[in-house]
Amino acid sequence: MTFYITTAISYVNGAPHLGHAYEAITTDVIARHMRQRDPDVFFLTGTDEHGEPVADAARDLGVEPQQLADENAARFREMVRELNVSNDFFIRTTDEEHGRLVQQVLQRVHDNGYTHKGLYEGWYCPRCADFKVENEILDGNRCPIHFIELIRELEENWFFELSRFQDRLEQLFDDHRSFVMPLARYNEARAFIDSGLQDISLSRARMHWGVPVPWDPSHVFYVWFDALLNYYTALGYARPDEDLRDRFWPATFHIIGKDILKFHTVFWPAMLMAAELPVPEHVFVHGFLLGADGRKMSKSLGNVLDPADVLDSYGVDALRYYLVRDVPFGSDGAVGIDGARARYESELANEYGNLASRTIAMIRRYNDGRIPGADTDPELRDEFEGLVGEVIELIDAAEITAALDRIWQRVRRANRYVEERAPWQLAKDPKAHGELHRVLASLAEAVRVLSVLLSPYVPEGAAKLLDALGSPDLSLAGAEFAQRTLARPVAELAPLYPKR
Ligand code: ME8
């Protein structure tokens, strides 16, 4: 079984912001979890570098688009690294190989007869790079996302005959209820299709910053088609010695934000059908992180929380954990540094971190650092019964927040177990040493299982704990709560999430 997951690719008209970080982190949680089940995972992220969003920003700064793209793509790459994101490739749509493959695929769409030249007249948002249809336009001809005034465009373009895919898209949605997730987003996409599809621009005559149309080189492709194709083209050249398209196409999951639903759930499958390529299995649509004012975080609105503030103060696990835990995946959520601090202190430090420290310290103090060979306690074992299966089922549906919640219930249960059994009391009573060994063996197993399950969320802390236990195996096959005897004594463990 293979599993191919992607993020949207980010516009390089500015620096990365928390919304980009959020998407990279949440996608990474799923990718890391899947690798724990089956190693044949491919995880793609990257940057979207053509079209007006980038050309206009470069013009305003008085630099060439390529220069702006180079500078900002480097910042996105750096962000991904700092966030501990485990992508297998980073695509840039200015990669030469990408452009070549875009031309190949869209030439096929043209050869298959799904294009025509025509006059486009309508309203256009240069920030979205989107030709808005009637019901997407706010009063005063404004963009519903950026609130800026739309531009009246009148130009001769190549059109993609989207209208001819009305029936096939309806069929796709009828047959695959999980094509778009969650259900509310499925309904939204379905409503857009049901309202009747119109042909859309495939090329721009007045734009030059893009991939040239091979059958009419005075045009470049409309940036959205160039961009969407990244998911497919990347597989063609990510590995110099292997064309990964046979192995990984179609994608299992595209993870995107709600503002780009129409492109991914309507235009994209139609384009693939026109090119005779299989369509992706699922598009999962997450919500927006909102600023303190409750509005979309965006450069143009100036309400962006810098992820660096959380990273500098609390570290990478804290940012990853906070965003996944506080914002139910699929919904919007307002976020800020106070919330991040609270989750760090009360949960990462006081619950998981403390459980880990106590367990290791007690094994060292009361049993010379050896995990006792005693049987684990059925009471705690029962609490973990079925947990791995629950997590797997939830993450199959991209329910990463719900899965984290289930795991965390057991973190809390294990902490209560420490209080109830009070190993420090048992240690004072020579007659209770059998019980003490059972409690220590159970706690060692609990923190091990919890760390394996938490590692997609907090890879740094989980790895430290598993290292101290001498049990680095991350596979979910080995994550059932059982009795373990480990070869070497546990190592000293510095606090996973120290007080700041
Ligand atoms: O849309 N909260 O790029 P982009 C959560 N290049 N997610 C957010 C967000 C926020 N505040 N702000 C943005 C593009 N995003 C195109 C995509 S894909 C073929 C081309 C998400 O840089 C947004 O929804 O504007 C999108 O999924 C991603 O960040 C990149 O946004």
Image: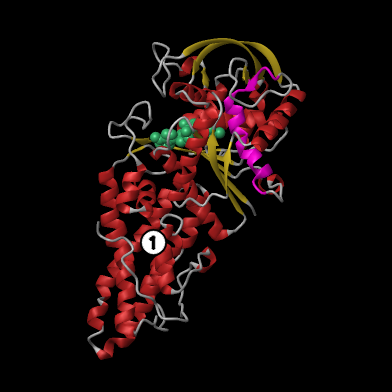
Q: Secondary structure at mark 1?
A: helix
Whole-percent x, y for residue 275 in the image: 71, 31
Is any atom of residue 128 visible in this view?
no
- Image point 47% across, 49% down: which residue? 81
In this figure, which residue is indicated by the disc labeled 1?
A: 461
Q: Nearer the viewer, residue 88 or 399?
A: 88
Q: Nearer the viewer, residue 45 or 97?
A: 97
Q: Is residue 264 magenta?
A: no
Q: Quadrant of the N terminus?
A: bottom right
Q: What is the magenta segment's predominant secondary structure? A: helix
Which residue is most to the bottom?
A: 430
- Residue 464, quarter of picture: bottom left
Whole-percent x, y for residue 305 in the image: 33, 38
Magenta segment: 217-239
- Residue 331, quarter of picture: top left
Whole-percent x, y for residue 262 in the image: 53, 28
Q: Is residue 124 above or below residue 83?
A: above
Q: Is residue 233 magenta?
A: yes
Q: Is residue 423 left or right of residue 392?
A: left
Q: Is residue 103 above or below residue 116?
A: below
Amino acid type, residue under disc 1 in the picture = Gly
Q: Is residue 296 above or below residue 328?
A: above
